[in-house]
Amino acid sequence: MRDWQSELDLEPHGEGGHFRRIYTSPHEIPTPHGPRPSASSIYYLLDERQPSGLLHRNRSDILHFLVDGGPLEYVTVDERGTLSRTLLGPDDERFLLVPGGWWKASRLVGEARHGLVAEVVTPGFDYADHEFATRAVLDDFPQLADALRAFVRT
């Protein structure tokens, strides 16, 4: 297995796993929350040391492309509280769109030892647009509490 963390110079991510920003558009666009780059992109890695990420959401749409490894399970919750599970892997989907405002988390599944994803965020990522889930999200969606609890920082 390739050492993607060293090869791509990835650093720890607050969501879990490791990442590195690889692109930020020089073109800004207006949003209700201030100007943002038109797009940005990162590499994101989950591995045996960090096999899952925390539940979070962003105001922007995020496109996820499997680069290597997997499968990874993405758990998403839309604004109505509908939970979906999508596998990204060599024998599964290779691409996933998570619309802005949806909660999402990911984890390695099965025999996966790592999962490397490239993400494209549009409008581009800004920390002001990012939110980690708290226990309050479990209260907002009590029917999903058992499915989401593992992804919420206690």
Image (tube, rainbow, N blue to C red):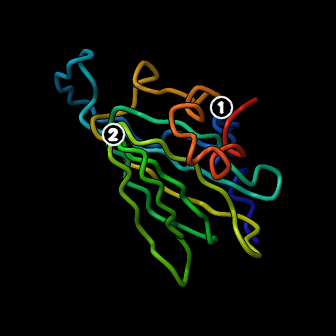
The reply, left or right, for residue 115 in relation to residue 119 is right
Q: Position of residue 28 (x, y in %)?
A: 21, 26
* Label 2, residues with CA under 10 Å away: few <14, some 14-19, many ≥20: some
Q: Position of residue 3 (x, y in %)?
A: 75, 60
Closer-to-camera residue (106/95): 106
Q: What's the mark number on residue 29?
A: none
For the N terminus, the quadrant is bottom right
* Label 1, residues with CA under 10 Å away: few <14, some 14-19, many ≥20: few
For the C terminus, the quadrant is top right
Q: Position of residue 68 (x, y in %)?
A: 59, 69
Q: Secondary structure at mark 2?
A: loop
Q: What's the mark number on residue 14?
A: 1
Q: Secondary structure at mark 1?
A: loop
Amino acid under disc 1: Gly
Closer-to-camera residue (5/73): 73
- Residue occupying the point 72% across, 46% down: 150
Q: Position of residue 142 (x, y in %)?
A: 57, 40
The reply, left or right, for residue 44 in relation to residue 97 is right
The quadrant in which residue 125 appears is top left
- Residue occupying the point 52% across, 39% down: 141
Q: What's the mark number on residue 100?
A: 2
- Residue occupying the point 41% across, 34% down: 58
Is 75 rendered above or below residue 79?
below
Amino acid under disc 2: Gly
